[in-house]
Amino acid sequence: MKLIEVRNLRKQYPNHLAVDDVSFEVAEGEIFGILGPNGAGKTTTVECVAGLRARDGGTVRVAGLDPNQDRGELRQVLGMQLQSAALPEKIKVWEAMDLYASFYPDPANWSELLDRVGLTDKRDSAFKKLSGGQRQRLSVALALVGRPRVAVLDELTTGLDPQARRDTWELVQQVRDSGVTIVLVTHFMEEAERLCDRLALIDTGRVVATDTPSGLIAQVGEEQRVRFRPSAPVADDVLLAVPEVSQVARSGDQIVVTGSGNLAPAVTLALAQHQIVPGDLRIEQATLDDAFLALTGRKLA
Amino acid sequence: MKLLVVETKLHLREWPQLLFTIGLPVTLLVVLGLSIPGMTELGNSGERAVDTQLPSIMLLLSLLITACTVVPGVLAAYREQGVLRRMSTTPVHPVRVLGAQLLINLAGGVVSTAILIVASSLAFGTAAPRQWAWFVVVFLLGSAALMAIGLVIAAVAPNAKTAPGIGSVVMMPLMLLGGVWIPREIMPDTLRTVSDYSVAGPLAQALRDTWAGQAPQPVHLLVIAAGLVIFGGLAVRLFRWE
């Protein structure tokens, strides 16, 4: 079942067209990513979905509700974590949870929720004393306190250190496992690749492509590169004889083999037959960055 | 309701500001009353300045500080930090935050008034407002009108840092017109006329009249009410949630 349906969404600001033509569907229980560079219209898109902004064109349905008309009901099924929204500096963690729980008719048990996001020992801390990662985790907890069916997480890990980012990713997966559908807005390729079941690539207010991360990467070709330093001299012919290999290049004492399929195992096997060991072996595969570059002609970040 | 409780706690956590808004007027009242010799002497009208004039002026000062600097400061900060925006993603509209803030600051005004009444009674034997029912009406109407001005300041202030500054710029002339710097009786005619239509002037006068035991002049109530309607309307039209 489709929990969110967006068709030909359009949003015009006084001086620029933020969203030109965006369509996508989100199935119940999936982590759906909206990936694109800064200023692509990602945040405006989810703000229209969440009913924070009135769209100028197209249709949006969230659990059958129209965000422009059913704002009240929508807020009961959709929880949102905002990119640039905070709490009063001196509010304590437990006060914020207790307060936000009181906004909903049938809230979650907030102290359990705090436990789940790992903030139980911070319950008496003021918001301004929390680290970036702790704030984001509190923000996720607040987005979930109304027991929403779908949670929108906007630039959740921006500004976090790598450890906090990984912790937050784990949290997002746990939330999905608890049955909440997630819309994840991000400009981090790695985050999208790692977390999302499917994602929409957005550029200048339009959807460039919608697919699974691996599907998007496959769209730009299965080409891979293997780099290594051979333990003994090796002729190009040895490598070109491998069916998966399409091209061999050398830079210094390094060999760069381009090809597809099970490239790395095939190359190492061929080398082993000549008693050659590939040192400093590196496998380079296409990434979502490459996919974005191929689809839009521009770099993601 | 929970919102009101939490906002009250947050308000009390800003205790240095609280101490200032409540403490400054009562301190000035006592210091001025004791140090300026004329204050405690009988004037032409048969009453001392500390009987009604000084306390009502200090009450005006207290209401002005709250409405022009405290209210815009908090609301502009809430807007800038995204507190109001965050709340707009929940089923509860952020207008409730605004309401809670106004109520809390009104309650602060009540406390401040009570302290002023008690302090002038203890220091100078000043009687409590004699027309107390009218006094309450004037107090509520005046507080509402001044807070509407504060909301307009919060609406037009570009960010949290400038809001109290803009508030002070608005507050200074209102203090002058309300008679904080020079009593309304000895104002030049032109200034006095402007003062009569300035919300602060009629408010100071009506507070003083009711303190002294007279009903407020209808024209004063009318000007204050007009201020409430005008600035309240402006606030509704101009207020930005983000």
Image (tube, helix red, strand yellow):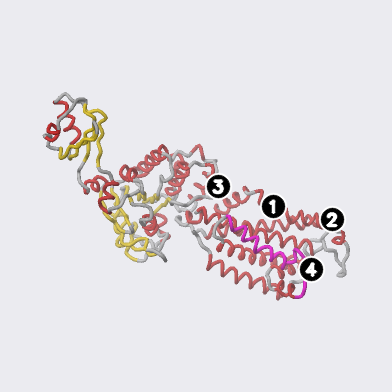
Numbered badge on residue B20: 1
Q: CA distance from mark 2 to mark 3?
A: 42 Å
Give the residue pinned by disc 2: B35
Q: Are marks 2 and 3 on the same chain?
A: no
**Residue sitting farthest toward the top:** A275
Q: Nearer the viewer, mark 4 or mark 1?
A: 1
Q: Label 2 crowding class (10 Å Cα cut-off): few <14, some 14-19, many 20+?
A: few
- Please determine if labels 4 and 1 lie on a single subunit: yes
Q: Residues within 10 Å of mark 3 (few under 14, many from 20)?
A: some
Q: Rounded to the nearest whole Å, what is the CA distance between mark 2 and mark 1?
A: 21 Å
Percent across and percent down for residue B185 are 80, 70
Q: Which segment is the magenta one? A: B161-189
Q: How many C-alpha atoms fall within 10 Å of the one at disc 1: few (<14), some, or many (≥20)?
A: few
Mark 4 belongs to chain: B
Along the polypeptide, which appears first: circle 2 or circle 4? 2
User: Which image quarter: residue B116?
Assistant: bottom right
Name which residue type carries label 4: Gly
Residue at mark 4 to residue at mark 1: CA–CA distance: 30 Å
Indicate whether residue B223 is drawn in magenta.
no
Tell me if label 3 and label 4 are in contact, CB under 8 Å.
Answer: no
Residue under label 3: A91
The percent position of residue A145, horizontal first and vertical second, equals 44, 48
Q: Residue at x 83, y 54 (%)?
A: B123
Residue A278 in view of the camera: yes
Is residue B184 shown in magenta? yes
Amino acid under disc 3: Ile
Q: Where A107 falls versus B147 (above or below)?
A: above
Subunit ID for the residue under disc 2: B
